[in-house]
Amino acid sequence: MKKFLDLISGETEEAFEKAGYDRSLGRVTVSKRPDLCEYQCNGAMAGAKKYHTAPMVIAEAVAGQLRECPVFSEVSAVKPGFLNLKLDRAFISSYLEEMRTADRFGMPAPEKPQTIILDYGGPNIAKPLHVGHLRSAVIGESLKRIIRYHGDKVIGDIHMGDWGLQMGLVITELKRRQPELPYFDTSYTGDYPEEAPFTVSELEEIYPFASGRSKEDPDYYAEAMENTRRLQEGDRGLRALWEKIVEVSVADMKKNYENLDVSFDLWLGESSVQDEIPGMVEDMRRAGTAYESSGALVVDVAEETDTREMPPCIILKSDGASLYTTTDLATLKVREETYHPDRIIYITDKRQELHFQQVFRAARKCGLVEPDAQLVHIGFGTMNGRDGKPFKTREGGVMRLSSLIAEIREEMRAKISVNPEIGPEEAEQTARQVALAALKYGDLSNQASKDYIFDMDRFTSFEGDTGPYILYTIVRIRSILAKYAGQFQAADPASLRIRPAESDLEKALMLDLAGFSAMMENACEELAPHKVCGYIYQLSNDLNSFYHATRILTEEDQEKKEGWIALLHLTEQVLCTCISVLGFSAPARM
Ligand code: ARG
C-alpha cells in the first residue's frame, strides 16, 4: 500500500507536469500552518529560478490543475508561491478503510531488509544496575522493536562488562573474606562447588567496598590487578569463581530487565571475545596498521578533516594488557564474521562518543568490517533530577534501577487504587503496566541525545505529554468499544466501515491516522523513538477532542455511529502498535 504522503505527492507531481514544470517540484509535506491547510507544497518557489518565472505564476498554474483533482477539496495559491491544500473527506476515509485491513496498516516492507546488530544495555557484572543503564536499555529496546516492525532483522546483544578490573576487585575481596575457598588453592584439582559462595546482595556490597578500598590501599589495588591478570590468563580456580560471579549477577540482571520488559537475543560480553584478541592484534601488527608508540601498541585514527584532536587508538597498553577499545574491536570482527551485518548500532552515554569514533575508524582501517557496513553510535544524554544534576536518591546516593522502578510503581498504585472498582490484585498489575509507561515514555519522548529531567509528578500524571495519558486514551477507547459491544444489535467493529469525516475534529483525527506509515518509516530511518511519542501524543489529543465533541454511543443514525466505532477501533489499534514499539502496553482499565 502506498504511503498517504506519496499518494498526495503523486497528484501534485502530476499537476506540475501538466502545467509544464518538472514533476520533482511537486513533493508535498504536512502543513506547517494547520490553521490554514492540511498539506502544503513549496515547489513553485523552488522552480521559480529554474524557469525564470514568478513563483506565484507557477503556483497559480499548478493550482488550476489541482482543482480538477478529486483528492483535494480546497487548493489555494498563496503569496509568495505556496500551494495550500485541503483533502477530500471521502479520499481520506477510503484510505483508512484500506489501511484498516492491510497488514501493518499498509506500511510498505523494505525492498532489501537489513541485518542489524543492536548493542544496548551494557551492564557491568557484579555492579548493581543503576539508572545510567536505564536509558540504554529503554532506548535500545524501543529501537529494536521499531526496526523489527519496519521489517529488518535485528539481533540485540547486551554486551556486558564482564572482564575488567571490577572482576579482579571482587575476587580479591572474596579471597580476603573467605580464604578457605578451593578457588584460591592453586594445588586444588577437584571439581568446584555447584553453589556460589555468595548471594547477589553480598556481591553488590562487595564491589563498592573493594573499589573504595583499592583507592586507599595500594597493596590491595596491586593484588586486584594481579588477580585480574591471572583470571585473564586463564587461572583455573579464578576462572571458576568468575563463572559463579557471572552466573549470580546475570540471574539478577535478567530479573531487572524482565521488570522493564527489555530482552536480548544474545547475552554476550567483553569476555566472549578474549580469545580473538591475540590473533587480531597479530594481524594488525603484520599489516602495519598497529605500531609501537612509547611501549604501547596503537593505531592512528586521526584524519585531515578533523576539527578536534583525535588521539591514536590504543590496542595494547605497555604491560601488554588489552582495553575496552581492544575488546570492542574484537567484538566487531566476530560480529562481522558471524552475521555480516549491514549496520551495527551502539547505544551508550554520549560521553563515550570519542571511544566509538576511535573504534569505528580503527575497525575500518584494519579491515575488521566490510567497507559498506554502517557503524552507528547513538550517544544519549543524562537523566537528571529536578535540581538539574544527575539523578540521585533522596540521600544523595546513586539510585538503583530496582529502587526507581519500585518508587514509580508505588506512586502509580496509589493513583490507581483511588478507583473503587479496581481491586488490590488488579491495581498491582495495572500499576506495573502504567509505571513502565510513565518511565519509558518519560525517557523516549525526549530526543535521545538531550539530557532530561526525571520528574516523578509530571511523568506519572494522567494529563499532558505522558505515558499514562496515552494509556488513559487507549483505555477510554476500549471502554467505548466495550459499551458499544454491549448494545443491542452491535456489529463486530472489524466488519464496520469508516465513513467520510462529519466534522473538522474527526477529519484531523483521520489525517493523523493516515500519516502512520510515514511516521514509522521516519522513526526507523532516524532511529528516533521520540517521533513515535510525538505522533501518539498528537493522535491522543485529536482523539480526545473528537470524543469530547461527539456523542458517539447515543447517535441515532446507525451508519454514522458505526463509522465512528470503526474509526475508534482503528485508532486504538494504531495507538497499541505504537506503544508496543516503545516497549509498553495498556491495561484493561485504570
Ligand atoms: N559496559 C559499558 C558501560 O557500562 C557499556 C558497553 C557498551 N557497549 C560496547 N560495545 N562498548 O559503560
Image (tube, rainbow, N blue to C red):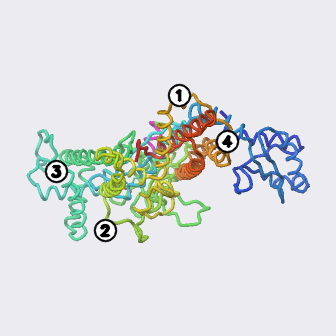
Instruction: Write down the region rendered in magenta.
Output: 332-338
Q: State the residue in front, 55 or 152.
A: 55
Labels 2, 3: front one: 2
N-term mark: 1 or 2? 2
Numbered disc 3: secondary structure: loop
Which residue bears the numbered disc 1?
489
Residue at disc 1, secondary structure: loop
> Residue at (72%, 37%) from the top-left corner?
91
| Residue labelled with disc 2 | 394
User: Which callout, 1 or 3, points at the residue further toward the start of the chain?
Assistant: 3
* Mark 3 closeness class: few <14, some 14–19, many ≥20 residues within 10 Å: few
Say whether disc 1 or disc 4 marks the residue closer to the N-terminus.
1
Towards the viewer: 554 or 532? 554
From what the image shows, is residue 499 above or below residue 183? above
Q: Which residue is mark 3?
A: 198
The Cα–Cα distance between marks 1 and 3, rounded to whole angstroms, is 64 Å
Q: Is residue 390 left or right of residue 199?
A: right
Q: Secondary structure at mark 2?
A: loop
Q: CA distance from mark 2 to mark 3?
A: 29 Å
Percent from the top left, x then y, of residue 564? 59, 38
216 is higher (above) or lower (below) than 350:
below
Check disc 4 and report the residue beneath it: 501
Q: Type of residue at label 4?
A: Ala
Rendered view: 381 above or below 341: below
Q: Position of residue 514 (x, y in %)?
A: 64, 41
Q: Quadrant of residue 280?
A: top left
Q: Nearer the viewer, mark 1 or mark 3?
A: 1
